[in-house]
Amino acid sequence: MRGIGWIVAAALIGQSAGASAADERRPDQQAFFALYKELVETNTAVDVGNCTQAAAQIAARMKAAGYTDQELTPFSVPDHPNDGGLVAVLKGSDAKAKPMLLLGHIDVVAAKREDWVRDPFKLIEEGGYYYGRGTVDDKAMAAIWADAMIRFKQSGYKPKRTIKLALTCGEETTYAFNGAEWLAKNKPDLIAAEFALNEGGGGRYNAKGERELLAIQVGEKAAQNFTFTTTNPGGHSSQPVPDNAIYELADAINRVRTYEFPIKFTDTTRAFFGMVAKAPTTPRPVSESITTLLANPNDAAADKIVSMDKAMHSTLRTTCVATLLKAGHAENALPQKATANINCRIFPGESVDETLAKLKELAGPKVTVTANMPIRPIGIPPRLDPKITGPMTTLAAKYFPGVPLLPSMSTGATDGIFLEAIGIPVYGAPGIFIDSDFSGVHGLNERIRVESLYAGRDYLFDLVKAYAG
């Protein structure tokens, strides 16, 4: 799960052994597997893959299930013909009930065959796992949402609340065409909803393969990149001077390194830390320090103890870190230019302009600081709404008894931020468990436990029906 460190795992551990995968799948599971397999085996990595094709394949399955052309809206733009997506609508019977939206991204992080043990774009079942790029992120959820919509239509299910599905491309690549952003800006009525369910929640197994914890994502940081630039006339390296572009850049980066943005809380993070502080297995110094910070966020001693865990540290504040460097033009010349990329994860409610102002202050007068395009919206934390969390909690007790469920704020970023910018609160749904090592997400040999996929599918199907009425 995103943003949860060892303290949470230790504090909120719940032992409930995962059931083994059935030897034979139900007919509905077989149909789902065919959709999931086709989606995983369709390369949708930016520049080399084709999201439009993947969306069209799902649309064909939905049409076969009974959806009309009026209920399906494929979309793309001329400049990015392979980065398209799909919106599907299952109309509800109650005109007064506002729609709900299921959001999933079908693009994936790039994967090179020579780096993987298995072909990343072939779904391979081995040792109780499905292997392949996107088996978790985010084709598991995208396939589950599409499969649920198909099952609803085939069974003749009539929801009270209209259910919408948006499958989009571009979530994994900052500079790519982003389907969720495009829909929010160009087709807001098409995806208008009271709330949306998205990735970002989930569950985690411990090292023994036991279900350890569940989380609901309620809010996220905004990801934003900035560029630091220093310039200098340069000269011959045999006659160095203190006025050096690399040194000036290094000094600025070091000031960013040592600066701590102030601690802030949302309703979600306050509830999250409160649960950790009260958990009986939380180390006493950590528990006491969390309690101190909840009362006084400016307590430096308590901050130092809690922030020893990198996930806790990031959950408390905006963070900025240097991720790329480029400098100089020759071995034997003083540098004429040096640049660095500073990647920031901005706390909900704080703006890009505010962060830019602080970075300029830290960088000093000899360093130019600019915000890189694209500039993402401000993070708007959704309410910790019992109408949303209630059904998640009730069904979690049914499907995953004894497993703790906690609210969390993602220290990463999802496409939910674009929907929240137009007034749609987005919640990362729990249900799909991954291993404690993150199951290879964004890395090599991405995988998901077979039992996790099918158990998560059943949970999420019932969850959608619980909201739809």
Image: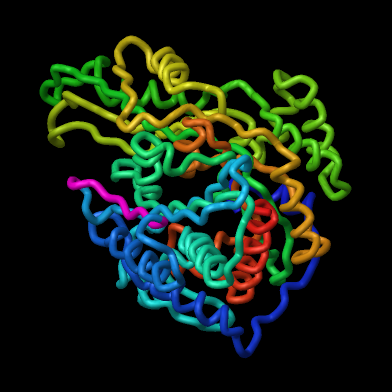
Is 326 placed left or right of 394 in the picture? Answer: left
Residue 64 percent across, percent down from the top left: 41, 73
**Residue in front for this viewpoint, 74 or 358:** 74
Q: Quadrant of residue 194?
A: top right
The quarter of the displayed image where residue 122 is located:
bottom left
Q: How many marks?
A: 0
x and y percent of residue 252 in the render? Answer: 38, 21
Query: Residue most toward the top?
Result: 365
Question: Which of the 4 image quarters holds residue 382?
Answer: top right
Which x, y percent locates residue 105? Answer: 43, 54
Residue 206, percent from left and from top: 70, 64
Left or right, 271 with reference to 448: right
Dominant secondary structure (helix, strand or loop) of the stretch shown in magenta:
strand
Check the image and report above or below for 136 versus 407.
below
Considering every residue shown, the one lying at the far bottom of the view is: 23
- Does residue 362 sit above or below 427 in this rendering? above
Q: Residue at x 31, y 29 (%)?
A: 372
* Residue numbers of the magenta segment: 71-79
Quadrant of the rendering where the C terminus is positioned? bottom right
> Could you tell me which residue is drawn at 76 percent across and 26 percent down?
293
